[in-house]
Amino acid sequence: MLYREAGQFKTSYLADSAIFPIRQDRIGIALILAIAFVGVPLVATPYFFSAILIPFLILSLAAIGLNILTGYAGQLSLGSAAFMAVGAFASFNFIARIPGIPMLVAFAAGGLVAAAVGIVFGLPSLRIRGFYLAVATLAAQFFIIWFLTKVPWVTNYNASGVITAQPIVILGYRFDSPPAKYLLVLSIVALMALAAKNMTRGNLGRKWMAIRDMDVAAEVIGIPQMRTKLLAFAVSSFYCGVAGALFAYAYLGTVEPEAYNLDLSFRILFMVIIGGVGTILGSFLGSAFIVLTPIVLNTTVTWLDAHTPVHIPASAGSNLEVVVFGVLIIAFLILEPHGLARLWSIGKEKLRLWPFPH
Amino acid sequence: MSEVAPVTATSRPSAPRASARTAGGVILAVDHISLAFGGVKALTDISFDVREHEIRAIIGPNGAGKSSMLNVINGVYRPQHGTITFRGVPRHDVNTHEAAAQGIARTFQNIALFKGMSVLDNIMTGRNLRMKATFVEQALWIGRARNEELANRHKVEEIIDFLEIQHIRRTPVGRLPYGLQKRVELARALAAEPVLLLLDEPMAGMNVEEKQDMCRFILDVNEQYGTTIVLIEHDMGVVMDISDRVVVLDYGKKIGDGVPADVRANQAVIDAYLGVAH
């Protein structure tokens, strides 16, 4: 690495347990936050905000949610999109039925409803695990989307089933321009990522990982399996629920069940696997990979078509994107099963020694 | 057959262990415990007691029911009959979580560490019962969450010093050699500051030096912290050297109980280990 911890001695356990124990890392993260909050809004185009940055951030939040459940607590779930839908529809109903409810309160309440639903669908985890649990959460995915489609009360008797989301108004300010929405989403995601990091680095995170790694031993040292697992489902679903509400209000502009299909659940699971199971950083890296790669591929295909003798018809181009994307994911899982976050830490370790092999 | 039992073949000539500590009253009493899995009788009518501050060994051939006995004591298995009295409180069965809260900690025969976590985190989980912060406090990293983390870290560092594993604090346990993993598992059990420590084959698969280290640690724990220890071990030399009293099980029945010298001379024990001609 260009820098290392040499010379930075800690004299308290407080300093030793900091999120970023090395000074250069702290400077680095401050720089990234400054760029994200100040630099990006100055230069980015509306397309960049709406098509790339906002979905990237929202899906990162959902990936953090799933990572808490799958990466830390070890409970495989295929229902993250359904919990996002619960958050979105609950927020919609709170805003529609309680006049004057603050928008952020409605989002948080949506998250809480998602958490409650998450606990219910987490109950099977007390008896079954692994692939069987994944199937149980798959049931959540299908049941919730069916419920939202078939029960007219939740869509406020809307005929089409696609509801236009109410505008986001906080303290009298309308967040309707892309940069404003971006800054709102960024603030929420940054705070919730910090909270997730705090939970996972402390006693709660250790309890989750203990259940994941060896549940009998965890019980023997006094970790109650039921409460710990259900708390993981609740916290995870809360994160997904808030992400779902933001997905509807800040990204799509509509509230509709079909946006939260199984495909989205799989994309979030891929983000967690490709980014790095059991890391908060990995959730962001995975989300960036899944959101950006199709766009990069699309641009590349268009460029090849326009600037080289290779002629690619539009239909073949879009299929080619899917093929390359799939190959990339498979290659990735074979070459680095622990994800981008592991690649990052391996890179750091290698650079400590570079250019010498030992 | 006289003094040439296999138990003596591996044991060093040793006087009864001279120790500063004195065994106190009965801390754990096992009364008429029977445990069966369907038609398989794992334990039949077992009774013995453990006195405060002593090192009590459970020995016996493979499948004798030693591990089952430990599993009954800390609530992993529920016996069909019998009671366990721990610190004067009799109970028929208990769940593992309650047993941990009462001050019973244990290690496992096959290492049961949390493989994805660092040594430090593994040992910190041993103190989870002493951390009361709610998840909201943890998410905001305020109040009890932060204070408990630091206070418990102090205690954990003490144990890390005690077991001489400072250099591997940050290493993921999966990367450690077997002997060190066993030591980390002991550290995790000690982190709970247990009253009663159950060790299931703490020296299995170790070389001579590692065994000597482990013996030293067990004796030190016993003397410095006054922890009562129940251990299962196959190395008779070790058992005879460090334990105060020994229980012998065979086919789920108790066939011997007493100080090492008596057990070594017990004809039933010798038969169980060597086999008898019928």
Image (cartoon, rainbow, N blue to C red):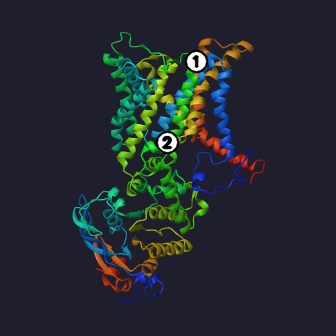
Mark 1, Cα crowd under 10 Å, few <14 / some 14-19 / many 20+, is many
Kind of residue indicated by mark 2:
Leu
Tell me: A160 left or right of B204: left
* Residue sitting farthest toward the right: A355
* Residue sitting farthest toward the front: A172
**Residue B177 on image: x %, y %:** 56, 61
Mark 2 element type: helix
- For mark 2, name the chain: B
- For mark 1, name the chain: A
Mark 1 element type: helix
**Residue A129 on image: x %, y %:** 38, 43
Residue A217 sits in which quadrant? bottom left
Q: What is the distance, in whole Å, between disc 2 and disc 1 at their CAs?
A: 29 Å
State which quarter of the image contains the C terminus of chain A. bottom right
**Circle 2 is placed at which residue position?**
B140
In the rendered image, the vertical position of residue B21 relative to residue A344, given as above or below: below
Residue B114 in view (yes/no): no
Kind of residue indicated by mark 1:
Pro
Q: Residue at x 51, y 35 (%)?
A: A192
Q: Which mark is residue A178?
A: 1
Q: Residue at x 72, y 54 (%)?
A: A7
**Residue B185 on image: x %, y %:** 48, 62
State which quarter of the image contains the N terminus of chain A. top right
Compare residues A249 and B178 and report the one nearer the observer. Answer: A249
In the rendered image, the vertical position of residue A321 relative to residue B93, given as above or below: above
**Residue A264 on image: x %, y %:** 48, 26
* Residue sitting farthest toward the top: A159
Tell me: B5 left or right of A333: left
Residue B245 sits in which quadrant? bottom left
